[in-house]
Image (tube, helix red, strand yellow):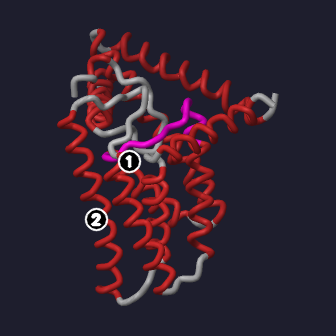
Amino acid sequence: MGVMSYLGEKGELKMGNYIEKILSFYQHNVEIDKDQDAILRYGLYIFISGMMSYAMTLIVGYILGILGNVFMMMVIVSILRSASGGAHCESMFNCALFGTVVTNGLGWIAQELPLTGKVVFSICSIVFLFGIWAIGKYAPADTPQKPITSTEKKYKLKRKSFIYIVLWYMGVGMYFVIFQRLHVFMIATAFGVFTQCFSITQLGYKIWAGGDYLIEKLRFH
Amino acid sequence: MKAKLLKISIAVFTFLAFTSAVSACSTVSYQPELPEQLKEM
């Protein structure tokens, strides 16, 4: 059994056990009914998996010396993802690992690219146009675990996604106008927007599924 | 005191669950199965 397998399969089971232990601690000390228990369990999963994803990604980013880029990418992805949805991996560990690899990979590329006006504004403009197309066509992209069925909710989330991407693009432009300089975060956030918008496309779902499959393969070899 | 702290933490996790339920999906992490109690949101 490899390291990946240990971290993945056993880690997953352990995480599930920890959550059950935390829940039974609550049940013994505070009066909670069945409905509250289900909501608390969901909240705990969201909190623990979120912390795990952020911690893994930021620690690797710190080691690689690209913490700022990675953090900014995560912030922009988190905000946009809350409205536009997108592909997810099948398990907590796979999702965290896949996110760590993609975010740090792109954060590193952002660091290496030349910081010139041509490069920055070409990337930002292409990503913006791609994002508008992807959101218009696919957002909000749901998952089998959390389907979005209400037409009203779909409309609201799509509109929010458009607002967020426009705000990002305006923010990049305004930063340049106000401070008269470029910043590597412009490219990093553009990569964040691209990753998020790509994850809502059909090809994005396939890539995420491929990543999931690859991690599973690595875990069992 | 312990019960009070636990109630506060329950409120925090419940808030997280509700914010996640109204958004399209969880932000950067794994998306667990949405409980029935939150499906109407």
- In the image, what residue type sits under mark 2? Val
Look at mark 1 in the image and give the residue it sits on. A81
Q: Nearer the viewer, mark 2 or mark 1?
A: 2
Is residue B9 or residue A110 the one in the foreground? Answer: A110
Few, some or many residues within 10 Å of mark 1 (<14, 14–19, 20+): many
Residue A147 at x, y percent in the picture:
35, 29
* Occupied quadrant, residue B16: top left
Residue A164 at x, y percent in the picture:
29, 58
Subunit of label 1: A
**What label does residue A131 carry, if any?**
none
Is residue A145 or residue B2 the one in the foreground? Answer: A145
Q: Which quadrant of the rendered structure holds the N terminus of chain A?
A: top right
Helix, strand or loop at mark 1: helix
Residue A14 at x, y percent in the picture:
60, 23
* Occupied quadrant, residue A181: bottom left
Helix, strand or loop at mark 2: helix
Residue that protrudes farthest toward the bottom in the picture: A180
Which sits earlier in the primary sequence, circle 2 or circle 1?
Answer: 1
Subunit of label 2: A
* Occupied quadrant, residue A190: bottom left
Look at mark 2 in the image and give the residue it sits on. A166
Residues at marks 2 and 1, CA–CA distance in whole angstroms: 14 Å
- The stretch in magenta equals A83-96
- In the image, what residue type sits under mark 1? Arg
Residue at 26% x, 35% y: name it.
B22
Q: Does A201 appear above or below A150?
A: below
Residue A45 in view of the camera:
no
